[in-house]
Image (spheres, helix red, strand yellow):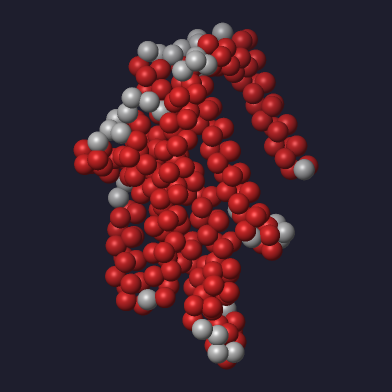
Amino acid sequence: MRENAAAVLVFAVLIAVWELSCEWGDVPTWLLPSPSRILVELWGARAILPLHLYTTTIEVLLGFCLSVVVGVPLSILIVLSPLARKVVYPILVVLQSVPKVALAPILLIWIGYGTESKVLIASVTAFFPIVINTSAGMAAVPRELLELSRSLDSPSLKVFWKVRLPFAMPYLFSGMKVAMALALIGAVVGEFVGSDRGLGYLILTFSSTMNTALVFGAITLLAILGICLFYLVSGAERLFCPWYVGNDEGRL
């Protein structure tokens, strides 16, 4: 609680300094609008914001879910199959090294400018942390624990469900937190490249008209959305990994 209060206090001080600097320094609004000006502009655009916020949220959530649905089974395959690890892992590393901004135009050409392309871009962007963290978690099970399970003649499937998967859950959720943030970035990149709705689209539209206040406003909404989605994953972590959440040391 003290750490949260300190963070809120520091944030409030920064906002106050920003506000006073804009007012007393006579900074042009088009260059750096004050926080109060941003709020006024956001309130003036309240009729159009919900649709664009909803669009970006759906793109992020669907892209994130797709990355989990594909990434977790692939992680299991990589850990349990040496052949898959030798073949798939290098391919994943090569794909991850390609900037997603460069892939976005190609995906838009292949799939179109609808929601599907933004979902796929978000998924591709968020995919790698899911695979890496989940694979690392399953591979990090102590050898003694696996040998103990085998000595009890536990079936391989039971060892997976009772040993490997629970041990990997904290790793998975750490990867999911990173993946959720990356999915948001991927969705916005897709909206930058080609879209007629979404917060990324609004940022481009407002910047083209030099409405800097609404650009900052859309960025603020993206930040709030990212924080909410992060805590959504944290809430799921508390639900599925209560034994890990209770130990705050080393948590992300």
Name the spot of residue 186 as percent of width and height, x first. 39, 41
Seen from the viewer's position, the closer of residues 33 and 125 is 125
Left or right: 132 as drawn, with respect to 120:
right
User: Which residue is at the front of the view, 247 or 55?
Assistant: 55
Q: Residue at x 45, y 49 (%)?
A: 65
Residue at figure coordinates x 35%, y 72% from the top left: 85
Which residue, as the protein is rendered here, is positioned at the far right? 2
Q: Which residue is drawn at 58% across and 16% down?
A: 39
Toward which corner of the image does residue 203 lie, by quadrant?
A: top left
Residue 199 screen position, x and y as percent: 43, 27
User: On screen, 213 above or below 4?
Assistant: above
Residue 181 at x, y percent in the picture: 49, 43
Q: Is residue 21 visible?
A: no
Q: Does 144 appear above or below 50? A: below
Say if residue 40 shows up in the picture: yes
Along the line of sight, which residue is nearer the eye, 64 or 141?
A: 64
In the image, is 236 to the left or to the right of 66? right
